Amino acid sequence: MALKLINAGLGRTGTTSLKVALDRLGFGPGYHMFDIVSSEERLGQWEKIVCEGQGPDWRAVFDGYTSAVDGPCAIYYSQIMEAFPEAKIILTVRDAGDWYRSTYDTLYQFAQAAGPSRLSRVVNTMIWNGLFDGRFADKKHAIEVYHRHNQQVIEHVGADNLLVYEVGQGWEPLCAFLGVKNPQENFPHVNDANSMRERLGKQLAAEVVG
């Protein structure tokens, strides 16, 4: 099994809704940040990639998965593309101000509250101290990084192989891009800010207890 689709959009741009939609369309199972959180083995793989700079066997990392969304995929999309040259690329986007507010209120707050852990080391190295240079609290800087990331994806990926997509657009553009029929049911909208806070709160409690 090889990846058929790679999501290059940053977290809090509808990536979890996209994963559920792709599963429904036959592009699952989808690799998501929650797959790393729930697996010591996968977390160890990403420790070596992110923190130790080891060049991975990407096919081994994504073995058993048809699509990859959220988390590290957005940061390493170009390397993953090289390993899976036939894969289609989706860039999930949303209003920059809404994206910043949602990320600040959920993922960033969790990162600030979490104590030292393997997961925190990976995420801090890759996202907060990596992509955002330790300056995510600076809204202007963070939004500039967000726009720059999206523009780099657009410039790097050929237009015939890229869908710039807002999950609020629903099934039609996604299904047209993938060449499949629109399902009859409503497009899934999951993992809103409140549910994200609840999930991260449980994860933080588990780390404290552990």
Image (spheres, rainbow, N blue to C red):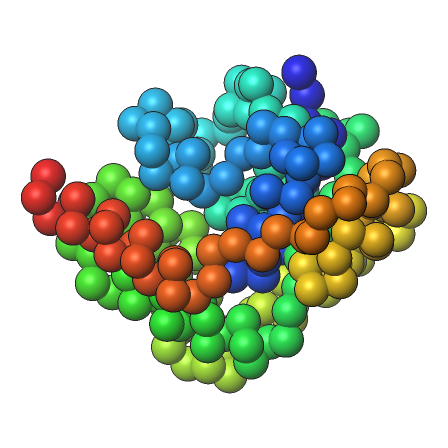
Q: In this view, does 94 lie above or below 17?
A: below
Side of 24 relative to 130 (left or right): right
Going 30% across and 58% down the picture, which residue do you hit? 198
Does residue 147 appear in this view? Answer: yes
Side of 47 relative to 188 (left or right): left
Rendered location of residue 112, percent (x, y)? 25, 65
Residue closest to the far front: 184
Rendered location of residue 123, percent (x, y)? 36, 50
Q: Which of 183 and 82 is in front in this view?
A: 183
Does residue 129 appear in this view? Answer: no
Screen quadrant of the N terminus: top right
Going 34% across and 44% down the picture, which residue do you hit? 122
Residue closest to the far bottom: 140
Side of 83 relative to 154 (left or right): left
**Residue 181, quarter of picture:** top right
Going 46% across and 71% down the picture, which residue do you hit? 102
Rendered location of residue 39, percent (x, y)? 34, 28
